[in-house]
Amino acid sequence: MNGLYALKPWYADRLSGIRGALARRGVSPDTLTAAGVVSAAGAATALALLPAPLAALPVAVLLAARLAFANLDGALARDTGRTTRRGALLNELGDRAADLIALAGFLPLAPLWLVATAALAATLPSWISLAGAAAGAPRRNGGPVGKTERCLLVAVAAASGWVSPVLMVIAIGSVLTAAVRCGRLWRELAA
């Protein structure tokens, strides 16, 4: 059950020309990580300030950019031989920050408890994956509501105005995703 994460190889192929251009220009992978966080902040701002459905286009475009930068930073580092432990740390911190910042766009639109619950739940799948990797298992991604699905759901809220239902789906789906990943890792680590 990989959800939209199953499209990652296809998507990475679509971005290969951009990666090549960035490599030729000497762009740092860390710059792309930062650009992903900035894109998430732009999406959050549009979500918070523009009414639905006017928020839909800027939110969708900025979250698509956030996902592209999240794909490009690590791939560029690998392509150019610039992978570092600090870069890996920055990548993980940038991904978590971008997730939380994008969800912060809901703060003026929904009760604080609901936004906080969705934000906390959205971090769980990544923490499970990182804990599994720390225990020696391969990094697990995907699931019913991973990073890509969360971005899509935020765009749905921006288009429809269905703020509370989307936040509930993000919260419940993220907990389910974390449980799926944890179950897979539990079985792998028992072997």
Image (cartoon, helix red, strand yellow):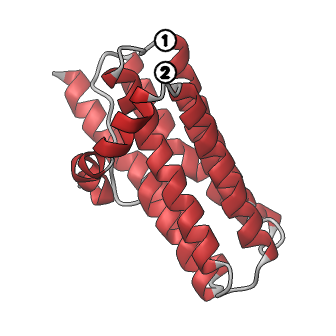
Residue where numbered disc 2 is placed: 88
Residue 60 in view of the camera: yes
What's the residue type where badge 2 is placed?
A: Ala
Q: In front: 149, or 66?
A: 66
Residue 113: name its quadrant.
bottom right
Q: In which quarter of the image is the N terminus?
A: bottom left
Which amino acid lies under the numbered mark 1 shown in the image of this protein?
Arg
Instruction: Describe residue 14's horizontal placement relative to residue 94 as left or right.
Output: left
Q: Nearer the viewer, residue 117 or 139?
A: 139
Task: Give left or right: position of 45 versus 123.
Answer: right
Which residue is located at x 33 percent, y 53 percent? Answer: 143
Q: x, y percentage for residue 42?
A: 71, 58
Most foreground residue, 23 or 84: 23
* Pointer 1 residue: 85
In three-dimensional space, the C-alpha distance between marks 2 and 1, rounded to whole angstroms, equals: 5 Å
Neighbourhood count class around disc 2 (C-alpha, 10 Å): few under 14, some 14–19, many 20 upward: some
Residue lying at 63% horizontally and 36% vertically, measured from the top left: 34
Q: Where is residue 100 in the image (x, y as percent from the top left)?
A: 67, 49
Q: Does residue 154 sit above or below 51 in this rendering?
A: above
- In what element is the residue under mark 1? helix
Residue beneath the point at 49% across and 60% down:
64
Which element type, helix, strand or loop, lies under badge 2? helix
Residue 163 shown left or right of residue 64 in the figure: right
x, y (%) of residue 191? 15, 21
Front-lying residue, 156 or 69: 69
Q: Are marks 2 and 1 in contact (CB under 8 Å)?
A: yes
Extreme residue toward the left, this view:
191
Residue ID at (39%, 47%)? 179
